[in-house]
Amino acid sequence: MAQATDYYQLLGVDEAASASAIKRAYRVLARQSHPDHNPDDAHAEDRFKRIQAAYQILSDPERRQTYDALRRDPLAMAFRAAGAFASSGITDPLSPSFFGPDAPGPGADIEAQIRLTFDQALRGGTTEVRLGDGQTVRLTVPKGVRSGLKVRVRGRGKASASGERGDLYVTYRVDPSPRFRREGDNLHVVETVSAIEAVLGAARSITNAYGQTVKVAVPPGTQPGERLRLRGQGVATPKRAGDLFVEVQVTVPRDLSDAQREALRTTAEDIGLL
């Protein structure tokens, strides 16, 4: 005798699972099994329909209660699996038609990508994404958004037969900066100083990623590759601000005259550096 599908096993949830847990499991499986994502799988559509059917039953309290009662009655479940309801002219109590035509369940989720410049990502603002059906969705870009961040926009996915929409998942892609390197909310920049400035120390003014002028003190004896930390001058997000790390690059002059070179040598010898 045929075996009836166990809807809990199909969705990968426990029979005591909450409604929200069932919905989460359904959304994950629906995305994975959607025919659009599996064009080479001949069974994808059938698998997707079975997942939808399971969610339609388990997401509705009355249908779930009926299903649970049948599930505890092996004879009734076997009766259903064998197709006896159809052959006897009785409506299957687990079919959508038994409960009316408006079966619950959201439509499919959809995904989109938005590309931002480095400056757009730092400052945030608003942007728009155009969906395949012609809809335009306006989004708020969080200040300091990172590349790869995925956000969910509820109810802007595809509509099901009952009119309930799935969700829209938007992934942000941020173009790199030619000057700054980002690590988390920290930024890194290279600043060039002369060998004399590295030896004696110097005060520099640099422009941060937001176009503001900030001062950085290069301590005497700074070594090539040493990093100077400017707290709070990195990426500003709604929760915190990262730091700016200034990596010191030391240059050695190539075009000294013989007299300048000799004067430096004499000075270095006098103070014991040579």
Image (cartoon, helix red, strand yellow):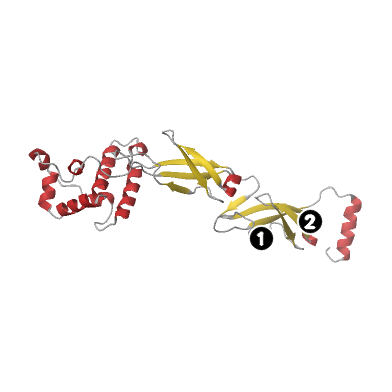
Between discs 2 and 1, the one toward the N terminus: 2
Seen at 61% across and 50% down, the residue is 181
- In the image, is 48 to the left or to the right of 134? left
Q: Is residue 177 left or right of residue 61?
A: right
Element type at marker 1?
strand
Q: Secondary structure at mark 2?
A: helix
Residue 2 location (% of width, % of height): 13, 45
Q: Which residue is mark 2?
A: 195
Neighbourhood count class around disc 2 (C-alpha, 10 Å): few under 14, some 14–19, many 20 upward: some
Q: Amino acid at mark 1?
A: Arg
Labelled disc at residue 10: none
Label number found at residue 229:
1
Amino acid at the residue labelled 2: Ala
Q: Nearer the viewer, residue 99 or 244?
A: 99
Relative depth, front residue between 127 and 242: 127
Foreground pick, 240 / 262:
240
